[in-house]
Image: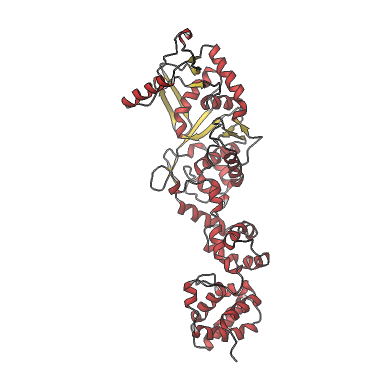
Amino acid sequence: MTVITRFAPSPTGFLHIGGARTALFNWLYARHNKGKFLLRVEDTDRKRSTSEAVQAIFDGLSWLGLEHDGAAVMQSEGAERHAALAHQLLDAGKAYHCWCTPEELSEMREKAKAEGRSMRYDGRWRERDPGEAPKGVAPVIRFKAPLDGETVIDDLVQGPVRTANEQLDDMILLRSDGTPTYMLSVVVDDHDMQVSHAIRGDDHLTNAARQTQLFLALGWKVPRYAHIPLIHGSDGAKLSKRHGALAVGAYAEMGILAEAMCNYLLRLGWSHGDDEIISREQATEWFDLASVGRSPARFDMDKLLNLNGHYIRHAEDSRLLADIKPHLAKFLGHDADPAAFPRLKSLLPSLKPRANSLVELAEKSLFLFHQRPLAMDKKAAKLIHAGSQAIIAKLLIELEDAEPWSIEGLEALIRSFADSQSLKVGMVAQPLRAILTGTTASPGIFEVLFSLGREESLNRLRDHTGEVPS
């Protein structure tokens, strides 16, 4: 049997991390089993579905590197096929017309509320003579669900899940305007796409029982279901925006690397021993549904950032130089000067350990791109006074003739200068850092001088020391 999975998001909102994890698990299961991973956009809710949300789904999956096999399926395009199968069930006596008025449905809802139970249709048109249909009311088509017994799902994550059929009412297959419902469309599309495994959130467990009944009524094979627990916030509450339940695109804007996000999502509810850092290749080799836990996973932004920091530290410098450009542009208000990128390239080994996101990496490297004269923050400005300016002015004379302009050579020169002035190195390095970077925190001052280069370093120093004393 060829394993075929599908990711079936609804484009009524942007792709969030819960959906992204579902897509990842489906992708990994398909790739692990050398099968197919399909994409179906369930856009049957035409009023709430938007083209922007559809594009965000495509963009999010592309950013995560979760390529799908074949063309994406738009569920709305199969409406005629879905409706035809509802009529097929009607002709076979497995479905029926229902002429309930909105008032009658409201009464059922109020009664259920008063009795402290969920709303269930009471089946009043199940065996009723259509000749009694009220005039002016367009009927829906309802599925004639089994009244007794139970529906059992052998779930690959949750284990056997039993639902008494008396708890399930006769769901609507076709609305009064002839359009198919989500429940019908999902079943038909899963069959037509030959889906072997439906991996999705456990909020679909009740849907699985209803859909299983519909599969059997149509004489089709039921996919293997795997319902994964939802993601909660770090406090155990339902995940919301305050926990970080943002659109996937927002994490890219926050400077999260795609591979870090995939690694983090993988570990939200799935484990492989004590392994925390798991590459895409390892994940594909190791992934199975047996290792998916049954308890809700907890999203922790700090852990994601720490993991992202690991991936930044191990990323190729050339890749980071490309990825950091849009973040630099946001800080600067314009595209970063290409001529300054060699400075950044030389300093990346010192900057990477200090950043947990591309945004943080960009922020810490801004001083390399700022135009002269360099502005200082308040802490840095306090370090520049007559005494420190005099020290830097004397150092400037020696730096002008520094040979070679290398990290080692600059370190030797500055240490020797500090000794000659009976100063601690810090008393030289602190004002030097303030002038060169505009801040009090940066990579090592010798690395900063080397990365800025002789001309830029000397000019920045001259901007804050005035005339060089004789």
Image quadrant where residue 319 sits: bottom right
Residue 252, position in %: x, y? Answer: 56, 51
Asked whether residue 260 appears in the rendered view, the answer is: no
Residue 39 in the figure: left or right of residue 208: right
Q: Is residue 164 above or below residue 390?
A: above
Type of colouring: secondary structure
Q: How many marks?
A: 0
Asked whether residue 261 appears in the rendered view, the answer is: yes
Q: Is residue 172 above or below residue 383?
A: above
Residue 375, position in %: x, y? Answer: 55, 72
Image quadrant where residue 469 sits: bottom right
Identity of the residue furthest to the bottom in this view: 470
Quarter that holds the N terminus: top right
Image quadrant where residue 394 sits: bottom right
**Toward the viewer: 242 or 332?**
332
- At a point 62% along the width and 28% down the height, the residue shown is 77
Q: Is residue 393 above or below residue 137?
A: below
Residue 461, position in %: x, y? Answer: 59, 79
**Toward the viewer: 27 or 174?**
174
Residue 205 in the figure: left or right of residue 116: right
Residue 211 in the figure: left or right of residue 372: left
Residue 17, position in %: x, y? Answer: 51, 44
- At a point 53% along the width and 49% down the height, the residue shown is 250
Identity of the residue furthest to the front in this view: 136
Quarter that holds the C terminus: bottom right
Identity of the residue furthest to the right in this view: 339
Identity of the residue furthest to the left in this view: 115
